[in-house]
Image: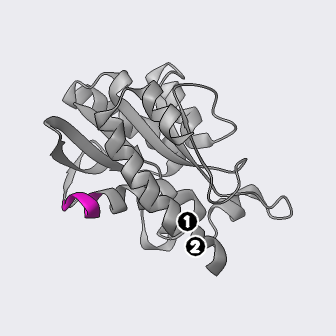
């Protein structure tokens, strides 16, 4: 069983913010697969589906990004998922809007949600798909990540979200090294 998690903040006021690109990817993936995230358990909104005969859970934690690790840990325990079968989709301030990077492990880069995941899973060895949201050092980081994309940025993000939905499907189909070689 695989778990694909998109990070974001619950609530309409955060729906289109930079910090919610993970949620946006999960929504695009669910749409592409024709499924709805309509179940709630352990603080998460999720659905189960099958991709190429593999059971897959799509998850949007329903606690704020900085506490998402708690939800992820509970879902991993409940469904008995190996951390090697988890992919975390998140925003990254240090990458330009429209860029993406797959990583098999590593530090959080200051991302509080990834910090919490590492704390809860007791490892930084989990797979991630990072989506660039750029950074504006003239704006407080919290205000920036909770802000909306400009019209131009949103056009770029819409394209990258669709590409990331395809990448998450390939996460099910390919060995992670092959996945990184294909998309990085």
- Residue nearest the viewer, comparing 54 with 5: 54
Q: Which disc, if any, is residue 157?
A: 1
Q: Where is the N terminus found, in terms of image quarters?
A: top left
Residue pointed to by mark 2: 154
Observer able to see residue 148: no
Left or right of residue 161, residue 71 in this image: left
Q: CA distance from mark 1 to mark 2?
A: 5 Å
Q: Main secondary structure of the magenta part?
A: helix
Q: Residue furthest right?
A: 138
Residue drawn 64% across and 71% down?
153
Residue 33 falls inside the magenta stretch: yes
Residue 12: x and y, percent? 43, 73
- Return the x and y of residue 113 as percentages of the image width and height: 55, 42
Q: Residue at 71% x, 57% y: name it.
A: 134
Vertical placement of 79 versus 162: above or below?
above
Query: In this picture, which residue range is highlighted in magenta?
Result: 30-35
Residue situated in front as seen by the camera: 106 or 78:
106
């Amino acid at each position: 069983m695989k778990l694909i998690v998109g990070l974001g903040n619950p609530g309409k006021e955060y729906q289109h913010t930079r910090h919610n690109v993970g949620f946006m990817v999960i929504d695009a993936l669910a749409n592409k697969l024709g499924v709805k995230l309509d179940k709630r358990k352990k603080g998460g909104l999720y659905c189960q589906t099958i991709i190429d005969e593999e059971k897959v859970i799509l998850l949007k934690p329903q606690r704020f990004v900085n506490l998402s690790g708690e939800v992820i840990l509970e879902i991993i325990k409940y469904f008995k998922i190996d951390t090697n079968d988890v992919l975390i989709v998140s925003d990254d301030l240090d990458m330009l809007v429209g860029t993406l990077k797959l990583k098999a492990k590593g530090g959080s880069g200051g991302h509080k949600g990834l910090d919490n995941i590492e704390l809860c899973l007791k490892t930084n060895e989990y797979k991630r798909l990072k989506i660039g949201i750029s950074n504006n050092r003239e704006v407080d980081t919290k205000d920036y990540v909770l802000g909306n994309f400009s019209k131009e940025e949103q056009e770029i993000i819409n394209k990258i979200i669709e590409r990331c939905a395809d990448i998450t499907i390939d996460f099910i189909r390919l060995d992670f090294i092959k996945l990184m070689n294909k998309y990085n």
